[in-house]
Amino acid sequence: MPSRNPSESSVSATKHLPPYTRQQKWLHWISAVVILWATVTGFMVVWMKPANPWRQFIDNFNPQITTVLIPVFLWRMVVAVRETSRHPKSSLSLGARMARYAHTSLYLFVTLVLASGALMMTHGVKLLGFIPLPQLIYSTATLDALFVLHRLFCLCLGALIALHVAAVVKHALSGASVLKRMT
């Protein structure tokens, strides 16, 4: 007979999940560190004056670190799509389908943030000090629109990150620690 306690069913459901591969774990944590850094510092610079040395550092560093993230994140999406295709949506519980939608939304908004961030650069930077990353768009009106979109995408991504962390905490409190599986 199935358990009536939701936390017991979460625990048993988690026990039957395949472990994350080393590759999945590395891709997750590299992405998480860069995305959290860029999100937090991106919101911080809003409150800093343009001449602030920390803002100048962040304005120079963030395009570089997020550019390095792009191929890592693309690789992560390929791995995620491959894993998702192994589990048809029709075979998933409601909670698993909700988690899949949340993860898909995270991937979508990370992609939108990375793309809009790359397009809205108002000056070129040197990646790792020697690979030039040129400014791609020069139209002030287009750059202004991209800046607004980028901020909107960042707010949505921030909300999705908060939801993701809340889900991790919820699972940990129910005894089905996803964090243990990811470390």
Image: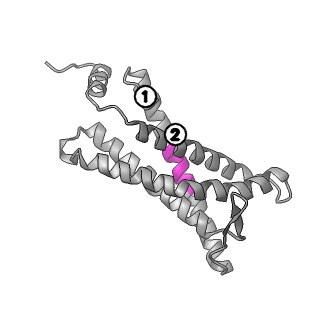
Q: Is residue 77 visible?
A: yes
Q: Main secondary structure of the magenta part?
A: helix
Q: Where residue 120 sits in the image (x, y, percent)?
A: 63, 69
At x 72%, y 70%, the residue is 123
Give the CA distance from mark 2 to mark 1: 20 Å
Q: Residue furthest bottom?
A: 139
Quarter of the image containing the N terminus? Answer: top left
Residue 78 against residue 168 in the figure, above or below: below
Residue depth check, mark 2 versus mark 1: number of the one nearer the observer: 2
At x 29%, y 43%, the residue is 97
Residue placed most toward the observer, 156 or 113: 113
Q: Where residue 180 sits in the image (x, y, percent)?
A: 43, 25
Q: Residue tagged by mark 1?
A: 170
Q: Residue tagged by mark 2?
A: 29
- Element under label 1? helix
Query: Image check: 118 left or right of 87?
Result: right
Q: How many marks?
A: 2
User: Where does the magenta region start and end?
Assistant: 154-162
Q: Residue furthest left?
A: 1
Location of residue 18 (image quadrant):
top left
At x 25%, y 27%, the residue is 16
Q: Amino acid at mark 2?
A: Trp
Q: Where residue 14 sits in the image (x, y, percent)?
A: 31, 27
Q: Amino acid at mark 1?
A: Lys
- Element under label 2? helix
Residue placed most toward the observer, 39 or 149: 39
At x 23%, y 44%, the residue is 87
Query: Image check: 81 left or right of 67?
Result: left
Of the numbered discs 2 and 1, the one sitting upstream in the chain is 2
